[in-house]
Each structure stands twice: as structure tokens, then as C-alpha cells.
Amino acid sequence: MKKLLISICCVLCVCIAPICSGFFVCNVFAETEICVDATAGFLVDYFSGEVLFEQKADEKLQIASMAKLMTIYLVLEELDNGNIKLEDNLVATQNASSMGGSQVFLDANSKYSIQKMLESVIMASANDASVALAEHISGSEENFVKKMNSTAQRLGMTNTLYANSTGLPAPMQYSTARDCAKILSAIIPNETYHLYSSVWMDELVHPSGRKTEIVNTNRLTRYYEGCDSGKTGFTDEAGFCLASSVHRENMRLVGVVIGAKNSKERFNQSVKLFNFGFANFANEQILSTETELATLPVKRSQISQTKVFASQDFYGLVKKGEDNEWSVSTEIDKSVTAPQKAGDKVGTATITKNGVIVKEIDIVLNQNIDALTFNQSFKKIVEKW
């Protein structure tokens, strides 16, 4: 079918780059005017993938319990795929209950719900709950680690290698600030994760009736406006670490700090990154699902025309005080032939900056279009005759 090319050129105060195949793209925004008092730091705009700051972002480092982000991701994936349910029970093995470090003190050979184990990992960074989940899903932690590493490759985390589900010190285990931002960004859209990620306190009631208090290790969820996601970490080898995310209005930032000198500083340095991001950047809407892009004639239907819209919103990162020229072009079918369903593609919106394509978005129908019945068609023929 022939296409109708409609060019809509806009001058917007925007700078942006996309996320491609799980990779964040470097850009001119990576400023040198700030630094973090830690081994590595990274700040990225979640919606555009625009890197705002990086410091040793690709250096392979120990990341301690931030490794649990992959454990969390895989548990959420199993839930989404219907392989497990939150109300399912698992049996905490002797191996799982013997984990040291951060834990919720599971009773060996006792049953616990998937929901409480996931909550314990997300909020309290519980090593025993992490291993219990890993063993339940894959039969052993070793098999689960294989899944962790294959998933890391799938997500484009090319500088990451896991040796366990907890982040406890192990030879040849490492990741980077950039890769930690990627896995947290992959988790953020999951609604189940947000049931627990910003909860400050809860408790785990053991089968014996004993209770363990669960406290969120990410203090920013309580003390920094808009922080709803994150994972802390600490070992002597890794130092104090934090991967976290803050959402304010149309902007979400993801920040990572590795190797801060103490717990207070990992939060302070993260706040420094977020303050820098929100002070210097903003997100503006380039495409809206509510804005009509064209009206098309309809064939073989009772209705004569239909409106078409972008299938998703698109936000661009604005560098405050700088102007950059953007263009949005749309290639749309000349007409629509019934029957069609709401959401059917009828064209493409291409967003470019300085001649470089940064995003392509489907243009779709927003209503069902029914074909004429035989009687309706016959009546139409008679009327024309």
C-alpha cells in the first residue's frame, strides 16, 4: 500500500539518546563539573537512556549485595511467566538458613511464602532468603547462578559475572556501575517489585511464631523525595554501594555509587548525583498518545474516517539553557480497510536529532473498525444505483 509522508518539524529544547538493546548510550551530557567520593559513579535518565554522569562506570568491581538485583529480577520474571506464585511456599534448606551477613534468620526445613522471601530480599537484603529463592527456582544455587549470568548477557550486561545469588565475596565475581544501572532499570517497570521497594518496615512471622523485623536498607526511600527503588550493598572488598532510582513528575533518574567510604556517604553521594540531575535537566514530551496525528478515510465500513495516534508517549531529555533542533516525521497509510482492531499499526513516527534517528514509534488506530455486513453492503450498492 502506498504511504503518505507527512513531515512535522519542531524546534524543541531537548537533548536525548535512546536505549538500544539494553545499552545506555554515552553523550555530551557526561559532565566533569562534579565527581563522587567513591570508586565509581553513574547517573542515567531512565526514559531516554541518556548518560548524565559517569566515573569509572565500566571498571569491573565487587558490588556486594547489589548482585541481588539479578536475583530479584529473575524471581519477578518467574512470577510474570506463571512458573511460581507469591502465595506459593518454599522450604528453606539447611544451606539457605546457614547464610551469614544480612539475613532474616530462616528456620531450616520450614516453609515460607515466596512473597515473604521476595520482600525480605528487596527490603532487607536477606542472604538466606536469596538462597532459598534460588534453590526453589533452579534446584540449586549453582544452577540459579547460571541463569543469572545468561540473563546478564541477554540484558547487555557485558561486564558482569555472578558467582552466587547474594553478592557475598567470591573469586571472579564482578560488575560495573553501568551494568548495575541496567539491571535496576530492567526491574523498575515491574509492579510487583514496587509493592515492597519503598516500604520502610515490616515483619516476617516464622512458622514457629517467632518474628523478625524487616527494615528497608535503602534510606533514600524514606528521606529523599521520589526515591522508590534501590539496592544497597557492603563488603570489605566492595565498600559501601547503592543503586537507586528517583521519579519526579516526568523524569526518572537511575544512579549508582560503588565503593563509598561508609554507609552515610553512599547515600550522600547518591543524593549529590540526583541533585545534579534534577537541577540541570528536565524531560519534555515530544509525542503524546492523546495527540491526533492524522485522520484517514475508511473503506468497507459504516464509518467514513478514523483518527490515528502514536502508540506510546515519548519524552526527551532537556539540558537546561541549551536549544537543540528536533524533527518528527510520520509515514502513514493513505486509508484503512475494514475490519481493523484498535491498536493495529497504520504507520510509523520517526524521531530524529541532527539527522540521527533516535526512536521509531508505531502509529495505531484507537478504535475497532467493523466491516460492513452483507445487508449493509447490499443497501449501500442499491443507494448508489
Image (cartoon, helix red, strand yellow):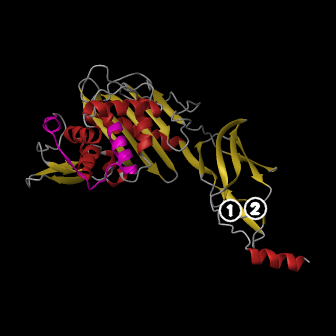
Residue type marked 1: Gln
Name the residue that disc number 2 marks.
Answer: 337
Judged left or right of residue 87, residue 353 is: right
Residue at image point 38% right, 41% down: 244
* Spot occupied by residue 104 in the image (x, y as percentages of width and height): 17, 44
Judged left or right of residue 171, residue 325 is: right
Residue at image point 25% right, 53% down: 88
The boundaries of the magenta stretch are 70-99
Name the residue that disc number 1 marks.
Answer: 340
Q: Quadrant of residue 70?
A: top left
Residue type marked 2: Thr
Residue at image point 54% right, 35% down: 21
Label 2 crowd bin: few (<14), some (14–19), many (20+), radius 10 Å = few
Q: Is residue 243 magenta?
A: no
Cα separation, mark 1 vs mark 2, equals: 7 Å
Q: Is residue 335 above or below residue 375?
A: above
